[in-house]
Image (tube, coloured by chain):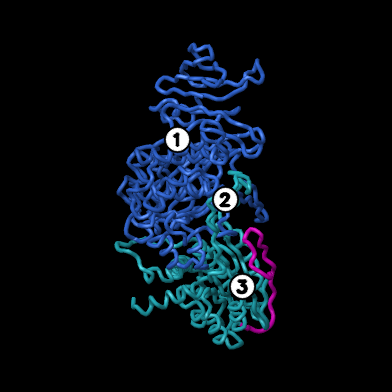
Chain colours: A blue, B cyan
Amino acid sequence: MTELQIGQEVELEYGGKAVVSGVIGSGGQGTVYLVDYNGMSWALKWYDIKKIKDPKAFKNNIKQNITDGAPSNKFLWPRYLTKETEDGTFGYLMELKPESFDSFVDILNTYKLKVDPLTGRATKAPVRFTNLSAMVTAVINIVNAFRQLHRAGKSYQDLNDGGFFINVDTGAVLVCDCDNIAPDGSNFGIGGKPGYMAPEIVRGIAKPDVQTDKYSLAVVLFKLLFRGDPMEGKKVIKDVCLTEASELKHYGSDALFVYDPNDDSNRPVRGIHDNVIKFWKIYPDYIKDAFVKSFTEGLHDPNKRVIENEWQKLFIRLRSEIISCPCGRTNFTSMFEMQDDVTYRCPKCGTTFATLGFSNLEYRLPLYIGSKFYECEIDPNSDDFLSVAGELVENKLKPGVLGIKNISEKTWRAKMPDGMHYNVEPGKGCPIWKGLEIDFGSVVATI
Amino acid sequence: MSKKNKSKGSEQTAAVQATEEEVKAAPVEDDFDLLDFDDDPLGATGVSRKSLVIFFLIDTSGSMKGTKMGELNTVMEELIPEIRRVGEADTEVKIAVLTFSTDVKWMYSEPIAIEDFEWARLSASGVTSMGLAFKELSARMSRNSFLNSPSLSFAPVIFLMTDGYPSDDYKEGLKALSSNSWYKFGLKAALGIGNEANDDMLAEFTGTKDTVVHAYSGNQLAQMIKIVAVTASQIGSKSMTLSEENESELSEEDVYAAKQKMLGQQIQELVKQDDSNDVSFDTGW
């Protein structure tokens, strides 16, 4: 007996009972139920233990994960194990995903289905990021979550599109399905999801670990940015029917990146992969180069895969290279013209954007009302990519005068047109001018 | 496995391959105007999904009349939302229903997306032209007809339900079907209803006894339809996890028909759990 009924009680290992109140969904290893426990709603993952190779080892691993705790608050981590039933079936409780988060799959599909419980009829509701900054923040959050996990010495193993929830307004990320997470080098039977699995796993010559996670992470990032499959192009489409043998071929030994610079036989196909074709034109070279590296050199050599810290830096840069033009066009600087080395120009309306250069960064921040930089960009020792340190604003008392507001907790020193340096306290600001210098401590920015 | 089998496998793969003209890759564009295309970085369409068509072949001959047909209609109505739930969200699942009695008839003129599918209740009369149904299915299972999705497809699920022995030459129909690559790679299952249905004949259609089940009562009919349809759409709508329990590199023959084997195993397991002692369909009338 593996299925639970509504109203059924499940005993928890350390006392108390959870009462099943609904079904949330089912996956390859079991079903997730909605349960009430101690007056709160929780999610209960209930295993179909027949589908688990060694249930005892699997359970012990979850137990260890519960003891270790989550690497950060970005994980919907297992919290309480249930008692085993007579036939050895068990499950665990985790927190529910907040309403404000959408599944990664729905984001990729651009809609979610809402099913009327009475008629069973389904309607579609659109799902898309509110703004570009939220999307890139989501990417940074995903990368950072796996950096934290890998730093804790564990691998996720089954990284795929079903593993995340994202808030499309803020870019906040929650990693779910944390039950296969295991110390690097251990595997409790999971292989992964085809399309996301590293080629060496598909071929049957490796088990999931931190290195294969890196491959899957690159696939997840590619799907989110380019909205397509990195290995599905002309060569794969020719097969028409994806049989077991063609999957083994196209995602295993013969996998070929659609934009492999040395082999164009698997390029995206118009009418099917229009997203990938479009976005490959939009993203800047340093982003595309990282994917090319991951999916060419890194395809069969796990040590050549891009590491999380590198991805994180690239995407922090990408977020800082967004321009919201007053004409309504929001895009990356790669889609703006350069008037000169330090000035961008909108190709649509001609508006120009001065830039702020940082002494520790190789890119320049375009300046427009609302452009922001973050703690990690003005402090080389900071990993804080969520706290805004400074923002370009219009002076409330002098309309038309633009300046940089200090939103950080430190006092800056700014050089003014009179050649003198002045303190800029938290909450205060300084006007921007050609020649402005701001000293943040160990980093200096100049216009 | 022998070398012969391997070459057979690749021949079959070749049969469903598209021609060069059908697949036009995007030309390489090095130079482009910044404004000559929709450059909204948030303006994406859904990621192209793989498609799966589930074919139901349903016997609507006179012998199905009454409780059997009523029961079947009700089960199928309930089944649609259930399949919608189990189908992987990154697969586009479509349904096509072919009924056969004296004639054959499609419920809708083309496969319908599961989100939009509504069951049209069936009624029963006439004889059992199963061979004709096989021929019709074979004609429609083609790139030029029902399986015309421009993106990748999974091999279809084909689920046959009948309560009797074919009244026409089913072998001839099956011969036509056997030469169809989609059928060869498809996930095939069959349900025999009552005492007249012949499991051996159904196994000729599925290619294996493991995916043939039998229902002798109303309760069983509902259970079997659900077990088979839900399991088949689950397995059919997702890629095969190829890596389990392997120490050495997988070859093409290692994975040949892996999904059909998996379907057989899972159906047998579920059917075993589900032995009920209801009154037989054909007795007690």
Q: Are marks 3 and 1 on the same chain?
A: no
Q: How far apart are marks 3 and 1 (CA)?
A: 51 Å
Disc 2: which residue: A278
Disc 3: which residue: B144
x 50%, y 28%: residue: A373
Amino acid identity at mark 1: Asn
Q: How crowded is the residue under tag 2: few (<14 C-alpha within 10 Å), some, or many (20+)?
A: some
Q: Point out the frontmost of discs 3 and 1.
A: 3
Q: Is the magenta stretch mostly helix, strand or loop?
A: loop
Chain letter, disc 3 residue: B
Q: Is residue A227 left or right of residue A206?
A: right
In the image, residue B50 above or below residue A25 = below
Residue B117 in magenta stretch:
yes
* Number of numbered callouts drawn: 3
Chain letter, disc 1 residue: A
Q: Point out the frontmost of discs 2 and 1.
A: 2
Q: Position of residue A5 (x, y in %)?
A: 52, 53
Please tell me which residue lies in front, B57 or A150.
Answer: A150
Q: Quadrant of the C terminus of chain B?
A: bottom right
Amino acid identity at mark 2: Lys
Assign a secondary structure to mark 2.
helix
Chain letter, disc 2 residue: A
Residue A384 in magenta stretch:
no
Q: How crowded is the residue under tag 1: few (<14 C-alpha within 10 Å), some, or many (20+)?
A: few
Q: Quadrant of the N terminus of chain B?
A: bottom left
Please tell me which residue lies in front, A311 or A436.
Answer: A436
